[in-house]
Amino acid sequence: IEIVVDLGRRPEARYSIGPGYLSQKIVSWQDLDYITKRIGKFSNENRAGIERTLHRISCIRNRQFLITGLTCRVGRSIFGAISIIRDLLESDYSILILGKPGIGKTTIIREIGRVLSDEMEKRVIIVDTSNEIGGESDIPHLGIGRARRMQVATTESQHQIMIEAVENHMPEVIIIDEIANSLEVLAARTIAEKGVKLIGTTHGDCLENLIKNPTLVDLIGGIQYVTLSDEEAKRRKTQKTILERTTYPTFTIVVEMNQQNFWTIHEDVKMSIDMVLRGQEYLEQ
């Protein structure tokens, strides 16, 4: 659920079933000023929050850097939202959650943090880049349970905070929202190699999208071109130049959030990747 407030237009609410206007009144400069004075300070990513809540407000600016629009995303903590994958959390395997923007990835990992820290009594550190997981406050929201939260000053420094969390605070689990660049991908691999369980999210529709993304493909082992001998190509019944996985994936399990109530689970992502590269059907739940 989002509320959109743009200068010169009517305020609008966007529900899962479709949009609807909230008022017949046109939004003015005074309306935007009234709202922005009552929320937190905007970061360099143009995001802000409301103290002790999970709501996120993002702004649109004009060429003079004045705010001309606001997108207000309603944040919620939903207990029981991850019951379908609870058995996967009980394992020591790292889990990557894949989905489109707005489908609920942050809500899911917030509940994962609560379950791991409260019910499974794990030492959990959440690397919270935009304060979306733990809320806009130095005191984390109750929705993350006993999990500890490390705030990130700028998006560019997220990979450094990820490594700092491992080296300084001895976690059993690290939770990261929106792995987006090569430095964060490298930091995730470094953490996994230290024996710490990772729970992460990234944008994408499905596993095939991740394979085609040159920045994020290393999360699932990376891919490379390999030239086969004539005999091997004949035995495999393929071309001489093929794609193969480079190394072991950082994340053993991938969960695709296709829809809010429909997920695809790859319990052995290594096998799934190999099957995709060979053009074969793979096992999924």
Image (spheres, grey):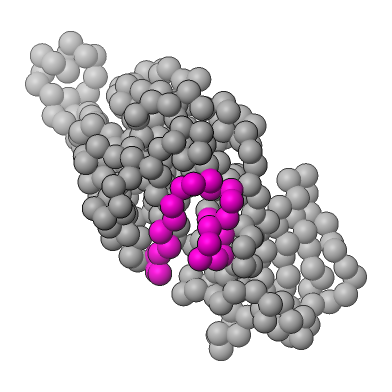
Q: In this view, does 51 lie above or below 247?
A: below
Specify the principal SS of the magenta part.
loop
Question: In this view, which residue lies farthest toward the top?
Answer: 235
**Does the magenta segment cover residue 261?**
no
Residues 135 and 63: in front is 135
**Residue 182 in view:** no
Q: Which residue is drawn at 50% across and 73% down?
A: 43
Residues 173 and 10: in front is 173
Q: Residue at x 52, y 53 (%)?
A: 133
Left or right: 262 as drawn, with respect to 266: right
Expressed as whole percent of the image width and height from the top left, the position of residue 211 reads: 35, 38
Q: Quadrant of residue 268?
A: top left
Q: In which quarter of the image is residue 63?
A: bottom right
Residues 232 and 174: in front is 174
Q: Residue at x 48, y 23 (%)?
A: 87
Residues 180 and 33: in front is 33
Q: Which residue is drawn at 38% across and 26% down?
A: 91
Expressed as whole percent of the image width and height from the top left, the position of residue 261 reads: 64, 32
**Magenta region, residue range:** 134-155
Expressed as whole percent of the image width and height from the top left, the position of residue 188 reads: 30, 46
Q: In which quarter of the image is residue 12?
A: bottom right
Expressed as whole percent of the image width and height from the top left, the position of residue 109 reads: 51, 43
Question: In this view, which residue lies farthest toward the bottom?
Answer: 64
